[in-house]
Amino acid sequence: MTAASRTVRHFHHLAAADRARLFLTEPGEIRVDGDRELLATALGATLYIPADRPGLADTVLRRSAEGMTSVVLDLEDAVRESGIEEATRNAVGALDELAGAGDPCTALVFLRARGMGCIPRIVELMSATAADALTGLVIPKFDGRTAEAWLAQTADAAAALGKHLYVMPVLESERILYRETRDAELETLSTVLAEHRESVLAVRVGATDMCGALGIRRDRDHTIYDVRVVADVLADIVNRLGRRDGTGFVVTAPVWEYFADHERMFRPFLRATPFVEHRAVRFRDQLVSRDLDGLLREISLDRVNGMLGKTVIHPNHVAPVHALSVVTAEEYRDACAIVGADAGGVLRSDYRNKMNEARPHAIWARQVLRRAEVFGVANDGVTFVDLLVALAGLG
């Protein structure tokens, strides 16, 4: 299968009967060479895997079969300095295996570069076959001083490999963290990225590096939005680079770092009532014991703050990101009503619990319909609990 003919489809791994029970409208097939914003929305939970891991291709194929839709083979923070050449060869070899696999990989695969010499070395090692499996490059510590050079290297790599390569810059430098340089940095990045718009799939943010520069590490009892100094940076990034007026990009949310149980200082984030109603109290306890209640809370706040998708470092985090990305029946019907109200005005929701204002809510409604195309629309009465239970194989 060539890269141009590939598609991505969420929840493909669920049985047909489960999809029929859960979805009013099932997720669609999103073409890799199709609409850029649709493909960016389809990233969902992007799993980072160290590029030096043995059996890398098998790991990607297994996770893809389990519902992962995007993966980054990480040559940067996850690999020690002395192991870069070996890890680069390992990652390129994995791409070659993925391209020739009898059971094709259904996930988007990216390489995270490390240093300016990394991309040319990748191109030297890569065959045309391996290139078919590569969707693009992730550029760490992307800032205004190096942006043009990174984007030029990506364009040169695409020309050398004879294919389109997407780029996902990671904003995590001190220039964007510090208040006195942030506005100028965002203005520079906005200008540069706009000039390369068709190559920029999404803008990623690295909250861990930003916290690290200030000697901060959030614990399991807090979301990144509780770390106000970093939350302010995320708000400014979305404000400048996430605009929905044709000048912005999809901005993805930062990583949740935890996946093991610990002694709690505060109550769990998850209310018990939805799980009682769905007879899934024990499942809720499992989520809480693995710190996934904090992740679910942060995913909800990601959406409210204008971000789509999320960087993840553990396979257990993929299902929560995807489950909370599904459009509810209520969201969908409200969005359809708003989009259909050509004359503007105020409409009472069919659910009799809110007013829908056609003009102020129009951009929101169009984004909901785009998300519905990618993640599907849940049946009436189906909640994130039902989706999580099904994705955990407990349904």
Image (spheres, rainbow, N blue to C red):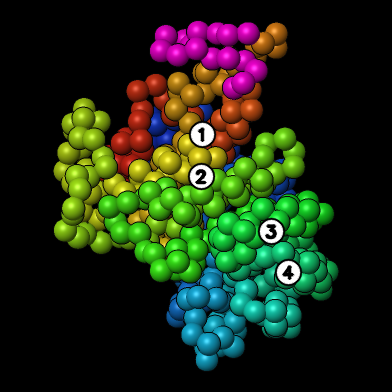
Going 65% across and 18% down the picture, which residue do you hit?
359
Please state which amino acid type lies under the numbered disc 3. Answer: Glu
Residue 376, label in figure: 1
**Discs 3/1, front:** 3
Residue 268: x and y, percent? 22, 45
Helix, strand or loop at label 1? It is loop
Residue 10, label in figure: 2
Going 75% across and 57% down the picture, which residue do you hit?
188
Other residues around mark 1 within 10 Å, as few (<14) / some (14–19) / many (≥20): many
Please state which amino acid type lies under the numbered disc 1. Answer: Gly
Which residue is disc 4 drawn over? 145
Other residues around mark 3 within 10 Å, as few (<14) / some (14–19) / many (≥20): some
Going 50% across and 12% down the picture, which residue do you hit?
355
Is 322 magenta? The answer is: no
Q: Are marks 1 and 2 in contact (CB under 8 Å)?
A: yes
Residue 298: x and y, percent? 39, 46
Other residues around mark 4 within 10 Å, as few (<14) / some (14–19) / many (≥20): few
Q: Are marks 3 and 1 in contact (CB under 8 Å)?
A: no
Please state which amino acid type lies under the numbered disc 2. Answer: His
First in sequence, mark 1 or 2: give its number.
2
Compare residues 5 and 223 and report the one nearer the observer: 223
**Discs 3/2, front:** 3
Inter-mark Cα distance, 4 to 3: 9 Å
**Looking at the image, residue 44 lies above or below residue 358:** below
Inter-mark Cα distance, 3 to 1: 37 Å
Compare residues 378 and 121 and report the one nearer the observer: 121
Which stretch did the figure color magenta?
345-361
Quadrant of the drawing holding the C terminus: top left
First in sequence, mark 4 or 1: give its number.
4
Helix, strand or loop at label 4? It is loop
